[in-house]
Image (spheres, rainbow, N blue to C red):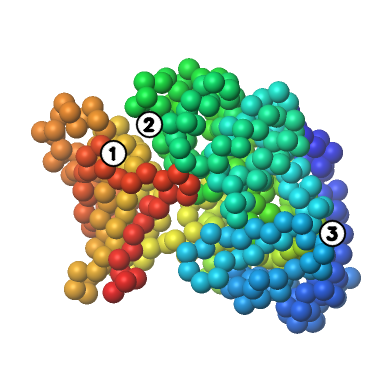
Amino acid sequence: MIWDVRNECMSVDEREAIQVKRLRAMIGRVKATVPFYHRVLADIDPADIESLDDLPRLPFTTKEDLRQNYPYGMFAVPMEDVVRIHASSGTTGKPTVVGYTRADIALWADMIARSLCQADAIPGDILHNAYGYGMFTGGLGLHYGGERLGVAVLPMSGGNTKRQIMMAQDFGSTLLSCTPSYALRLAEVAEEMGVDITSLPLRSGIFGAEPWTEAMRTEIEQRVGLKAYNIYGLSEVTGPGVSNECEYQNGSHINDDHFIPEVIDPDTGEVLPDGEEGELVFTCVTKECLPLIRYRTSDMCSITHDLCPCGRTTPRMSLVTGRTDDMLIIRGINVYPSQIEQVLLSFEEVEPHYLIEVDRKGTLDQLTVQVEISPDFFADRVGELEDLNRGIRGEIESVLGLSIEVQLMEPKSITRGEGKVQRVVDKRQTD
């Protein structure tokens, strides 16, 4: 089912005409209402924007710009028009603050309704929503979007995993929304409880809020017994619902009638062509409270405008491979956690629970990967651990091009997360 055939399936020319019209109007509005944009857009006349090819003429907006104008300096409406405030879960400095008008909330709900339809949701479904509620946008975003579509929403939030399993059983949940790592945690706890989670009515899972890989998708689909769809978003742009995968699971459809995407070289700022991986950038042309121009997300992916068999004409983005600020530089080599995850999940002897530690021994950086052994392998084939360690280490070193250490951990010895999971500990930052 397609939620909004008119806007999701319009022609490319019609789409760009709408985008340019909205872009001009947004530029004029933020120049008049946001001091930051009044300054950086001083030489830009909205009437001079003739096509999307003119986007590179506009300046980038960064997370630091939002922090410098904390808390409300980037809002384009008076506070009496703001009905909701969220904030990012940043680990350092001030959070980035996001405001919503009533129209922004309605738009957000529509975007989530699109996403749920792409994930095979229909009115009458029961959405088990295990994203966190609060300042994080995940829980309330899926909640309002589910209600907009007409599904029954269970506002579970995160935590109390055994109770979540019981509720999914008793209430007959058909849809699951949470982080990919928490989906695996649900499967693990269900097994401990003696519950066959694959026998539940769960049909579709809407997973996001952290980078994950195709190997992780396969693991989730097998262990939870559903079809796993990627949902993408970030609070600064709106929250979840910026894009979502359809039944073909071949890239997430971007709602570019509202959020115009670009992919740039993170070092030079140059716009990259389709298919090349770079940093994802968004321009929000319809948001009222916090319309952002060329916002640098730090997320790394690629975009394609090839037509999807589902009939939607929106561009599609690949799974996010990592973040520019999550990239590790080890002895001059760029390393993304997703590269390591891809290797680990190719070994059936280990579980999808791992931790990457980076430390400095003297003047040399050292990368150590801790990964749990599967219970069956740990119980029956402990004598083969050395061979397994050597095999994993060799595969990772081949991918990364540098030497590492691998530590095989006992089952369930790595701390589990109920929200965004922490995969990396960089001890160099505390030196």
Asked whether the viewer can see residue 86, the reply is yes
- Of all residues shown, which one is farthest toward the right? 47
Three-letter code, disc 2: Glu
- Look at mark 1 in the image and give the residue it sits on: 412
Three-letter code, disc 1: Lys
Nearest to the observer: residue 406 or residue 317: 406
**Does the CB distance between marks 1 and 2 fall below 8 Å?**
yes
- Find the distance from the CA under tag 3 to the CA under tag 1: 51 Å
Q: Is residue 367 above or below residue 198?
A: below
- Rendered image: mark on residue 188: 2
Please tell me how crowded label 1 is: few (under 14), some (14-19), or many (20+) other residues with Cα within 10 Å.
some
Q: Is residue 168 left or right of residue 350?
A: right
- Find the distance from the CA under tag 3 to the CA under tag 2: 47 Å
- Find the distance from the CA under tag 1 to the CA under tag 2: 10 Å
- Look at mark 3 in the image and give the residue it sits on: 22
Figure quadrant of the N terminus: top right
- Of all residues shown, which one is farthest toward the top? 199
Please tell me how crowded label 2 is: few (under 14), some (14-19), or many (20+) other residues with Cα within 10 Å.
some
Figure quadrant of the C terminus: bottom left
- Tell me which residue sits at (44%, 61%) in the image: 326
Q: Position of residue 151 (x, y in %)?
A: 70, 29
Element on which disc 1 rests: loop
- Tell which circle, 3 or 1, labels the residue nearer the N-terminal end: 3
- Tell me which residue sits at (59%, 29%) in the image: 175
Count of marks placed on residues: 3
- Tell which circle, 3 or 2, labels the residue nearer the N-terminal end: 3
Q: Is residue 383 left or right of residue 354?
A: left
